[in-house]
Structure formats: structure tokens, C-alpha cells
Image (spheres, rainbow, N blue to C red):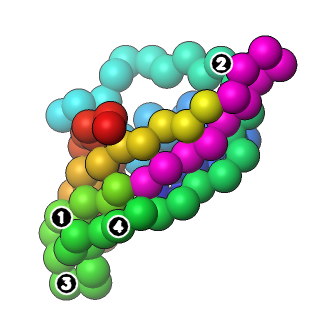
Amino acid sequence: MRSRFSAFALGLPEYLLRSWHPSTRPAMLDLDPDQRWTRLDIVGTRSGGPFDSAGTVTFRAWWRSDSERGTLEETSDFVREGGHWYYVDGVVA
């Protein structure tokens, strides 16, 4: 989760697509260059440990642009395949 937030903050759509599970991954991803992600708080986790094949992360992320500020709250599901974690989907709060 933290690496995906960093990819949003740094504007790295290639990394986001690579870390997105193929079953739900979009064909392309356009990031808003005016939106700056500034902070990530992990609110909670369920599973996702070294012996788990799936996990859930609930987080709050702060963003801003020249004219707006806001937060995104989401519960995201991840799966581990071949030793790598992949984002599957999320539910926005």
C-alpha cells in the first residue's frame, strides 16, 4: 500500500499498473498532474502477513491541487501471487 501511495505521489502510473492485479487492472491510467498526494495514514489492516495470500488495508490519503484539498478513504484488497502483492480493488468510504 505504501509503495502504491508513493507511486501516486511521484506520478508513476507504470508502477501502479504493474502492481495492479491483471483481473482488475485497467488498460491505461491517467494521473492528474495538478493533484499532489501529501500524506498517507494506514487506519487498519486485516491479514496480509508473511504467510497470507490475501490482505486488506484501510487507509486515508490527503491530496491537494491549486484550487482544492481533500482526502480519499478506502478499504483496499490485495492478493499475493508469485511472491508479489497486487492491488485487486477497493471500496471508497
Q: Secondary structure at mark 4?
A: strand
Query: What element does badge 2 sit on?
Result: loop
Residue type marked 2: Asp
Query: Do labels 3 and 4 touch, CB within 8 Å?
Result: no
Question: Label 1 amino acid?
Answer: Ala
Three-letter code, disc 3: Phe
- Residue at the location (26% across, 37% down)? 91
Does residue 14 lie above or below 81 as drawn? above
The amino acid at mark 4 is Gly
Residue holding disc 1: 54
Q: Earlier in the sequence, mark 2 or mark 1?
A: 2
Magenta stretch mostly in which secondary structure? strand
- Number of numbered discs overlaid on the protein picture: 4
Disc 1 versus disc 3: distance between alpha carbons? Answer: 9 Å
The quarter of the displayed image where residue 21 is located:
top left
Q: Which mark is residue 32?
A: 2
Is 56 in front, or is 19?
Answer: 56
Q: Earlier in the sequence, mark 4 or mark 2?
A: 2
Chain part drawn in magenta: 59-69
Single out the residue that lies furthest toward the right: 66
Image quadrant occupied by the C terminus: top left
- From the viewer's perspective, is 8 left or right of 28? right
Earlier-in-chain disc, 3 versus 4 = 4
47 is higher (above) or lower (below) than 28? below
Label 1 sits on a secondary structure element that is strand
